[in-house]
Image (tube, grey):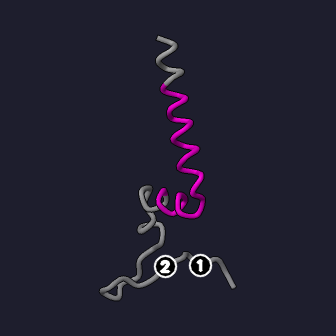
Amino acid sequence: MGDKPISFRDADGNFVSAADVWNEKKLEELFNRLNPKRALRLAREKKGNEKADREEK
């Protein structure tokens, strides 16, 4: 077995690379579904960064 790119066929029967399908938005949705606390952590970090930015000004 060698290294093979992950791909599948689309509705038209053409091969599509998985890299073409998994864009940033879909990956974000997948990560948040697999780890629900991730979204809460990211929101908390964003809020903390915004607060720190306001305090610097």
Q: Position of residue 3 (x, y in %)?
A: 64, 77
Q: Which residue is mark 2?
A: 7
Q: Which residue sits at x=44%, y=62%? A: 26
Q: Is residue 1 left or right of residue 14?
A: right
Q: Is residue 53 above or below residue 38?
A: above
Q: Which residue is mark 1?
A: 4
Q: Is residue 57 above or below residue 1?
A: above
Question: Farthest residue in the bottom direction?
Answer: 13
Marks 1/2: CA distance?
9 Å
Q: Which residue sits at x=58%, y=44%? A: 41
Q: Which residue sits at x=51%, y=41%? A: 43
Amino acid type at circle 1 is: Lys
Q: Is residue 18 above or below residue 2?
A: above
Q: Which residue sits at x=36%, y=82%? A: 10
Magenta stretch contains residue 4: no
Label 1 or label 2, whichever lies nearer to me, is 2
Q: Is residue 3 above or below residue 44?
A: below
Decide which of 30, 41 is in the foreground and name it: 41
The segment highlighted magenta reads: 28-50
Q: Is residue 39 left or right of residue 25?
A: right
